[in-house]
Image (cartoon, rainbow, N blue to C red):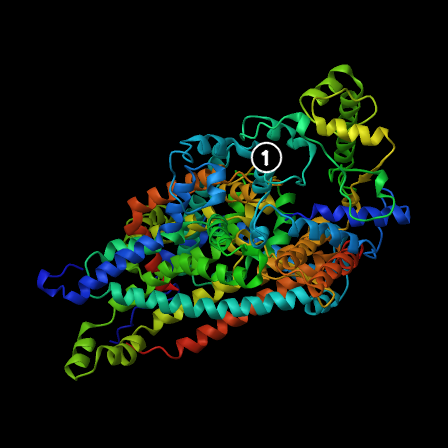
Amino acid sequence: MKKKKKTYDGTSVNCWLVRRPIQRWFPLFILPTFLCFLIGFVWPFLQGLYLSFCSFNTPTDAKWVNFDNYIKAFKDASFVHAFKNTAAFAVVSIVVINVIAFFIAYALTQKMRGANLFRTVFFMPNLIGGVVLGYIWSIIFDAILKGYSTYLTANATYGFWGLVILVAWQQIGYMMIIYIAGLQAVPGEIIESARIDGASGWQTLIHITIPNIMPSITICTFLTLTNSFKMFDQNLALTGGAPSVMMEGAKVNMTELLALNIYSTYNISRNYHGVAQAKAVIFFLLVAVLAIAQLTATRSKEVQQ
Amino acid sequence: MKHRKSEYTTFSRILTVVFILLCLVWIMPIVEVFINSLKSNAAINLNAFSLPDAESFVGLDNFKKGVTFGNYPFFKSAAYSVIITVLSVTLILLFTSMSAWYIARVNSKFSKFFYYLCLFSMIVPFQMVMFTLTFTADRLKLNTPWTIPIVYLGFGAGLAIFMFVGFIKGLPLEIEEAAAIDGCGPVRTFFLVVLPMLKPTLISVGILETMWVWNDYLLPYLVMDVNEYKTIPIHIQYLKGSYGSVDLGASMAVILLSIIPIIIVYIFCQKYIIKGVAASAVKG
Amino acid sequence: MQRRGHLANIPLYYEYKDAGITVGAQPAEITGTYLDNFRNIWDLYITDTAANPTSLSSSTGDESEAEFGQGKAVFYQNGDWEFANLTGADKGFNLSPDDLAMIPIYCGVAGEEKAGLNCGTENCWAINAKASEENIKASEENIKASEDFLYWLVTSDEGTTMLAEQFSGIPFKGAKDSTNVFGADAAEYASAGNYTMFWAFNDTPNVDSWRATVVTALTAYSADPTDANWDQVKTAFVDGWAYEYGVVNG
């Protein structure tokens, strides 16, 4: 008699025993969540999509304008500038955060006293909110730059690197935790056999350890990428986008990243509500494409355990 | 990881020293906030990095000024932050775990549909929905600290359901079958059998959601009447952007007050928090 | 050092005066005719300062107040609300009112001898035209109540006394004499027939945004006072205005 392999999905399970009764309780288990999900996500998303093609102050006076908003968005010098800023910021952050987090994690997983304490300290900044962090660091940077007769929002370069430092300080601890978990999951035997084979510490690192923690690298790169592109609170609190200059006939806030640009576009004037919403749609597509592309790229590099 | 004393080489001792220094540098910003909260404004302006001396030390003055600064008592903001966070996280944990169990056990078209919507929602940035959300929340009166948790449930459901489903799929079905045979309806099965098994994920998701809601600036700012209801992030941003000169000392004091509870909770729960973060990443 | 750009009211005011624009009309563009005069006064600010010229851009209002209060500077730009700070013991300046005066800001414009002080505020009332009937009505009632209060404040005995003694206000007909010498100076200029420089910023489209761009350019100029950098100020001033006007008015 062939024994059917028990798989744990709902259909092959004893339907009448577990699944049907649960289904009858749909109003309790699903409905509240689904309703809130509709209210808090689905409807605003769909309405946002619709309004991106309209000129509107509030949804009640929306007028369809085809692709006007999108054209304006792409032609907006501040939007293009914010995009370049964000891309540059993402690249720099990904490298800085991941490299430093990895090496700290690598060090902490060696035989070392106090590793737990250090781990606790490095992770702590992650718990503090973006707005508070931005404020704290703006004061620190202003104080440091005062010694050089300048201040944080005097120059876009200061703002850019200030944000990099702030975000690195906040996120290194988080990525470090993930790398530690990944490193601890590498079987000790592999490392040992590499040592026995005469590989140097450095060679072991590059050829054995790193390939074996590809899942962690995938996750961390994914997180730093999406975090960088979605960055808002810290951007707002650190520089607010200042300084602002006239560029190509438009006003550009030099240290604005994409999310902040969308927000300030909306608040410039009610004529720009539609443009801001169009920018938000473009932004969403950009983040989605990046996330999917990056996940596929690094997933394929993962070593099968 | 405890090692025998002989395994601590000179190299590892050097590492330890290096890391002690690194940690000290790492916490400098927090220490700076603390130091400056005890100095007078003039002293902070002059040199934000100096230690308070007899002339610049102002004791608890900054704190007294800080909590009443700007016509809105800080403790009111803190209270609203607590209310919103507790309500939101409770709502999220309760309802999304229930929904995730349904989705994991009932393999209907609707389940799949809802699940994929959740996955989709995880890559949508907040900016995409934030303007329209304000209109919706206003219409439905979801703009007070008591009703905004519904919005948080809506926007936070995606990630939570995703994580819970992942975990539940790994739970052995026999236990639930046994419960059903014993005559337990789904509600009792869920609350008495499944939920206890979900504890680790409840903690991980709970920590992530708490960190998100507690530190969230935009959603409460856009949706609630800021004159009536402020949360801590809103309060801090207001301190920064006030017209005229900002009272630096008072601001430092308020920032310290908003960080201290976080640090205290962290010191007591760090094991859970760090484990939760690692676990959530693995699921991702 | 100006981070808010209020000094820019001067070139704006003179343009308005020439064009006969009064408060409430928003010109679509400005020409920057008086920017050279603006440069005159700005150069004065950055060359003959009590502070180290190179650290100007990072100094604060508190510091310039301190320099004035401690006798290191002869002029500093501020408003009549500073009277209490300067003469009081709180900040330790203890200056005597007899040693203090408020003068107009001169920048080389013809007819300046009749200049008075800058005077105004950016506060205003607004009702959302799209609000519901009942909300509009309620707002209108609130505004009427506020207007009644203001009227009482400047006509009643109690109100005018409070204004003179506790708040240093803007001079007006029927104002009581105040111990605030700045307020007294303002009243003197007004009664001598000098023109008050009203707050042209009230009609600036997206005023904070426009000023932010001007201030960025001014900061760059202060660090390196070249013609090229002043051209940037002109661009921010003129082009920035046209841009903001376009943004606000569609």
The one nearer the camera, B263 or B189, is B263
Residue at x 77% of width, y 25% of height? C150
| Quadrant position of the N terminus of chain A in the picture | bottom left
| Quadrant position of the C terminus of chain A in the picture | bottom left
Left or right? Give the position of B222 relative to B10.
right
Helix, strand or loop at label 1? It is: helix
**Quadrant position of residue B19:** bottom left
User: Can residue B115 be seen here?
Assistant: no
Residue at x 58% of width, y 65% of height? A284
Q: Relative to B35, say whether C246 is above or below.
A: below
Left or right? Give the position of B161 relative to C157.
left
- The residue that disc 1 covers is C69
The one nearer the camera, B252 or B48, is B48
Left or right? Give the position of B10 relative to A87.
left
- Residue A73: x and y, percent? 69, 66
- Residue A97: x and y, percent? 40, 65
User: Can residue B216 be seen here?
Assistant: yes
Residue at x 68% of width, y 67% of height? A77
- Residues packed near mark 1 inside 10 Å, few (<14), some (14 to 19) or many (20 plus): many
- Residue C195: x and y, percent? 85, 37
Marked residue chain, label 1: C
* Kind of residue at disc 1: Gly
**Quadrant position of residue A194:** bottom left
